[in-house]
Amino acid sequence: MKRAGCLLLAVAPVATVAVFLFTPNHDGGKDSQKATASQHSESDAKAAKAAAEKKADDDAIADLPPGLAAPAKKELAQQLIASAENSTLDWRGQYGYIEDIGDGQGYTAGIVGFCTGTHDLLTLVERYTKAHPDNGLASYLPALRAVDGTDSHKGLDPGFTAAWKKEAADPAFRTAQNSERDRVYFDPAVRLAKLDGLNTLGQFIYYDAMVLHGPGTEPRGFYGLREAAMKEANTPAQGGKEKTYLDIFLDVRRKAMKSKNPNRDTSRIDTAQRQFLYDGNMDLKTPLVWKVYGETYKVP
């Protein structure tokens, strides 16, 4: 939604080899060949270690309950997100939602608020266009690339909002939104929450933070917030108490939300997620009652 930034993945081994190859002293001799081979070997070793660690994590997660990934809980998660982002429980009615809410991130659209200024909307349309080249949004790709990272509407007005709404009637575009939501936000958040030893509520808290703050490593991005919380309390996986850790994580989130705008409403935390936490509802059991922006929502 209101992204703090994007998570960029480094490709250090490739860069290292490139620098070496274009160094003036490189003469293609045996010593340089040995060095290059050593670098490749080191890169391969790192890749193998990362793959082994991922497999170990996958195996650990496979033995855990589905948590927020269970169909009924995932449906509840989308209702909770929609109550905070669109003031409704009807999250499926938001595929065609699009407006500029004046937050400096251009147009906000779709089921998790993809933004023209935060790269995720561009990525969604690029991936959708690759699978469906003749879609009604494809012609806006040059403009979307040009405004990415800004709040500009240049090249998008006046037709983009109408094109988005029209495309949202296509089941293929709805599926694309679902897939991008899962790939970028839901799946990474739930996976990491499980590795941190968090139950269903904690998994949702991570997911909501990922959606609102974006998968960034800077202080107001999701990974930056998690790092800040972990400096104050251990996760359950580290031997800490779940309630204590989540309470601190919510404090960090709330502070980040207020840092940009002191008057920003934080009821999605104050009268929803924190209330669930204080009630001890770690499994997000229903019936569930919460308030956002002063409005009460109920799921039986």
Image (cartoon, rainbow, N blue to C red):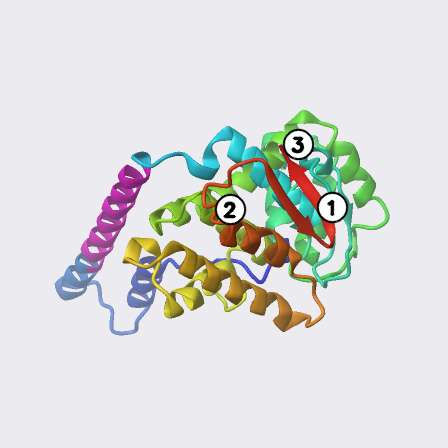
Residue 142 visible within the image: no
> Residue sitting at 71 percent across and 35 percent down?
90
Which callout, 2 or 3, points at the residue further toward the start of the chain?
3
Q: Secondary structure at mark 3?
A: helix
Q: Is residue 91 left or right of residue 203?
A: right
Please report the residue visible at 51 percent of the width from the left and 66 percent of the height from the top: 252
Task: Tell me the quarter of the picture where residue 298 sits.
Answer: top right
Q: Which mark is residue 224?
A: none
Q: In the image, residue 148 lies at what x, y percent? A: 66, 57
What residue type is disc 1 on? Ser
Q: Nearer the viewer, residue 227 or 21?
A: 227
Residue numbers of the magenta segment: 39-61
170 over 285 or under it: above or below = above
List x then y, in percent, for residue 65. 37, 34
Amino acid tagged 3: Phe
Question: What amino acid is found at the position of numbered circle 2 in the picture?
Answer: Phe
Q: Main secondary structure of the magenta part?
A: helix
Q: Which residue is mark 3?
A: 173
Quarter of the image that includes the C terminus: top right
The percent position of residue 51, horizontal first and vertical second, equals 27, 45
As drawn, which residue projects farthest toward the top? 171
